[in-house]
Amino acid sequence: MKRLILICVFLFLLFTGFIDAPVQSLKPGSLSLRLRLVFDGKPLNLNNALYTDEHGDTLSIDACRFYLSNIVLTNQTQLIYREPYSYHLVDAEDSVSQVIQLDRVPGGSFSELRFLIGVDSLANVSGAMDGALDPIKGMYWAWNTGYINAKLTGRSPSCNTLHHAFEFHIGGYLPPCQTLRTVVLKIPVIKPNQEQIVSLNVDVGTWFTQVDLHKTNSVLLPCTEAMRLADNYQRMFSVITE
Amino acid sequence: MKKTRLFYRVSGILALLTCILAFAGTDTPVKFNAPRGWPKPRYDFSNNPLTLHGFELGRELFYDPFLSSDSSTSCSSCHLSFTAFTHADHKLSHGIQGLVGTRNSPVLINLAWNTSFMWDGGVNNLEVQAINPLTNPVEMNSKLEDVINKLQRTAKYRKLFYRAFNDSIITSKRLLKALAQFTGNLVSCNSKYDSVMRHERDVHFTAREENGYELFKKNCATCHREPLFTNNKFENIGLPLDSVLRDVGRMKVTNDPADSLTFKVPTLRNVEYSAPYFHDGRVNKLKDVIDHYTTGIVESRTLSKELRRKIILSHDEQKDLLVFLKTLTDKSFLYNVQFRQNRVPD
């Protein structure tokens, strides 16, 4: 008897929940992630702009590209949204690549944004890919197959190299040389029907944490140094709250 | 009134049927048949549905020097069908303008079972393997992007890609998938050895072959594991380091000193025709290979455990082993017209 009552209550709740549903607005909408590339807080300009890193080295940046993948929105306990086929190549030279539009995001509140910097290992072993993962994008190593997760190149008088150039091509998906990094960010709770924009600072300066460009200026292979730089750029992202 | 409706209905059905037929016509599915009793192939054709037109496109690309920067070198320049797709008579393969590479071109046999590619295993998937020769400055020296644009400009390839992928837009993904449809289908499974294993009527090993087979199982088969004649692992078989090439093998991709001087165990199918041998083609005759295993092994830190115990074979036993290796020759593979250049009409 008790059980029957419970079932009735349950059905009642379910039913009223059903009727109530439209009020909560579960309309899927879109959410834009806007990336603002900076160096130590200053807007990132390529080629000629000069910056100073933590170590005191003066430097300029020629190119900055990285993969941002596997975007997920949660409300801390629950997965709310997972972007299908989530691979984006962000390029400092291409402003279009700095806005990532997530489609069919359910209305409702969520407070956490997660993504990977780099390309997951499944995509690394899946053969020929297209779109952002097309090997013609120049973010791919063919002889030791795998994606370059992030690239940063530039110049600094501290580099004792041809044209004082430094080159960081960070990749490696196999343990123990894994350079894939996860980023978890708290974002302001977005209410249904609010304009859905999340702006992120991407501070390229973090790459140089405890890096002496005189000693470390060419990282083009997976492993030790690549992992250290990946740990550094994992801290590139912060949420802009205006 | 009724008659016209019937007419419309019939013609509607007919139109639908022709559509279905036309669609099927552009895309003839083919099944990849793994020989009975063999392990499951590693390459997953379900992500690259095999079709006759896809295979033909792959073959056309494989034989077309147009893919190289100066239209001089095709895949087949270094991988010839009559020699099990190795570069016959060349220790080190050369590409455009005769530039010489650093390794011997391996046979292309049963690639669908490989767990990795290249002598050092640096490539993890058959599809992406082809990026290497296409872009290597001493092989075909093209930029992937340029190859795509070049192909896209030809009516011939627009048509061939359309037939294979229902779309004439050429992408690197389609190019690589098509090549893999061809190379992944280079299956050799009809040697005398195979007939004996399948207990085919009237096919038997001779006494010498039988003895050679026993010696093989005892001394060689842990690495050259049947039926593929490779265990897909990397081993140092005690070849001394070449002082010019200084090729450290697998360590190049893993950075692990334990992998120094280890190379991928190659298949031995059709080995009678795939000279020269070893990763740098340093020996020309199968007999010299056997000599290496019996008397030439150089001790080193990473020498395979398997080979620390000396292999002792009498003169006759060495001959028997050689005779057995020749039973791995598969004429139906070497002379398969499907694998040869077959110009598709423009």
Image (cartoon, coloured by chain):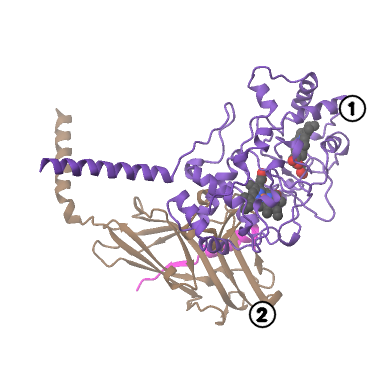
Chain colours: A brown, B purple
Asked if residue A236 lies left or right of residue A10, the reply is right
Left or right of A213 on screen, residue B145: left
Q: Residue at x 60, y 38 (%)?
A: B113
Instruction: Bin the neighbour count of mark 1 within 10 Å (Cα to Cα): few under 14, some 14-19, many 20 and up.
Output: few
Q: Is residue B170 above or below residue B206?
A: below
What distance separates the C-alpha of mark 2 from that of mark 1?
67 Å
Q: Is residue A140 left or right of residue B193?
A: left
* Callout in the foreground (2, 1): 1
Mark 1 chain: B
Q: Which residue is mark 2?
A: A157
- Mark 1 lies on a secondary structure that is helix
Q: Is residue A170 visible?
A: yes
Q: Position of residue B1 (x, y in %)?
A: 10, 43
**Amino acid bearing label 1:** His
Compared to B243, does B290 lie above or below?
above
Quadrant in the rendering for residue A86: bottom left
Q: Which residues are magenta?
A: A220-242
| Label 2 close to label 1 by CB (< 8 Å) | no
Quadrant for residue B199, please give it. Answer: top right
Residue indicated by mark 1:
B315
Category of crowding for the residue at label 2, using alpha-carbon neighbours closer than 10 angstroms: few (below 14), some (14–19), many (at least 20) = some
Amino acid beneath label 2: Pro
Q: Nearer the viewer, residue B127 or A220?
A: B127
How many marks overall? 2
* Position of residue B266 measured from the top left corner of the image (x, y, whole percent): 71, 40
Q: Is residue B281 magenta?
A: no
Q: Percent from the top left, x then y, of residue A167?
A: 63, 69
